[in-house]
Amino acid sequence: MQIFETSQYFSSAARTRVLEALLLQDQPIPLRHVEYISNLSVRAVELTLKDFHRERLIKRKKLGNKSYFLPNKQHPHFGWLKEMLLVARKARLIQRAESYKKHVEEAVDWANSAIEGHRRMRDLNK
């Protein structure tokens, strides 16, 4: 496997987001859901899905006039791509949790200061 072959999947934010939207789903999803999950424009999703379909990384099912997309689990790169995306998602969640923790600590500090200020004002008014 050449480096180009593996790095091409992450060559743009659109490719990475669409990959994550599809590879971490348990069932086929329509284009609009991929658009929503990936937070990309319909056109960007369409072009990326077209590329992935050409590369046989995803499958497309047509039901009526709607297309549904799902990962091709028989693709030779499916397993490690999914693992990489799971690791990346976990890292983002940890980073987000640490950020929230910092905000919560700041809010608690602010609330404690406000409570202390209120107590001092109350004691002065006695």
Image (tube, grey):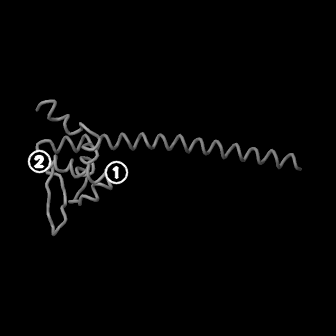
Farthest residue toward the top?
Answer: 3
- Residue 126 x %, y %: 89, 50
- Residue 101 x %, y %: 51, 42
The 10 Å Cα crowd at callout 2, few under 14, some 14 to 19, many 20 or more, is few
Residue type beneath disc 1: Asn
Q: Is residue 123 left or right of residue 60?
A: right
**Which residue occupies 17% across, 44% down?**
79
Q: Earlier in the sequence, mark 1 or mark 2?
A: 1
Q: How many marks?
A: 2
**Which residue occupies 62% across, 45% down?**
108
* Secondary element type, mark 2: helix
* Secondary element type, mark 1: loop
Residue type beneath disc 2: Arg
The 10 Å Cα crowd at callout 1, few under 14, some 14 to 19, many 20 or more, is some
* Residue at image mark 1: 39
* Residue at image mark 2: 54
